[in-house]
Amino acid sequence: MTLNYIDYILILYVIYLSIASIVSFILYNRDKKLAIKGQDRVKEKTLLSSAIYGGAIGSFLGRIAFHHKTNKIYFSVVIYLSIIIELLVIAFMVFIKLGGIK
């Protein structure tokens, strides 16, 4: 089986999303720990940016695992929209791979 360019792009995109999600998850963990200790926190802008730039799954899981920022509606909106966009990009790449666009 040989890989074509769309295979490589899809693989790299999934790796990128995985790394970004791990970073987002760690950021939520760190922010929660800092909040408990009453220390300077990770900026909300940083947490939201981590979701927008590919870490939406990690942000989603971090919010659940650490019960952090769960009451902030705008966090939910940004994270859910980011997840939808990430999944649409993957679906589009799979569509192309299956011969959807010629």
Image (cartoon, rainbow, N blue to C red):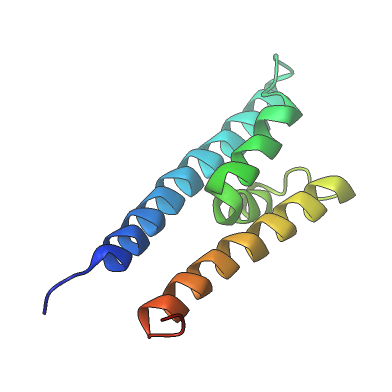
Q: Residue furthest top?
A: 40
Residue at left 75%, top 30%?
Answer: 44
The percent coordinates of residue 39 (x first, y second) are 70, 15
Q: Quadrant of the N terminus?
A: bottom left
Relative side of 3 to 10, left or right: left
Quick check: 58 above or below 33?
below
Tell which residue pokes out farthest to the front in this image: 102
- Seen at 41% across and 45% down, the residue is 19
Give me the residue at 73% from left, 29% from top. 45
- The residue positioned farthest toward the left in the image shown: 1
Camera sees residue 72: no
Q: Determine whether, in the image, residue 71 is placed left or right of residue 93.
A: right
Between residue 10 and residue 54, name the one nearer to us: 10
User: Where does the C terminus fall, quadrant-wise?
Assistant: bottom left
Q: Nearer the viewer, residue 65 or 12?
A: 12
Say left or right for 15 vs 26. Answer: left
Q: Is residue 101 above or below residue 56?
A: below
Q: Position of residue 4 (x, y in %)?
A: 22, 68
Q: Nearer the viewer, residue 97 or 11?
A: 97
Q: Is residue 101 at least partly visible in the picture?
A: yes
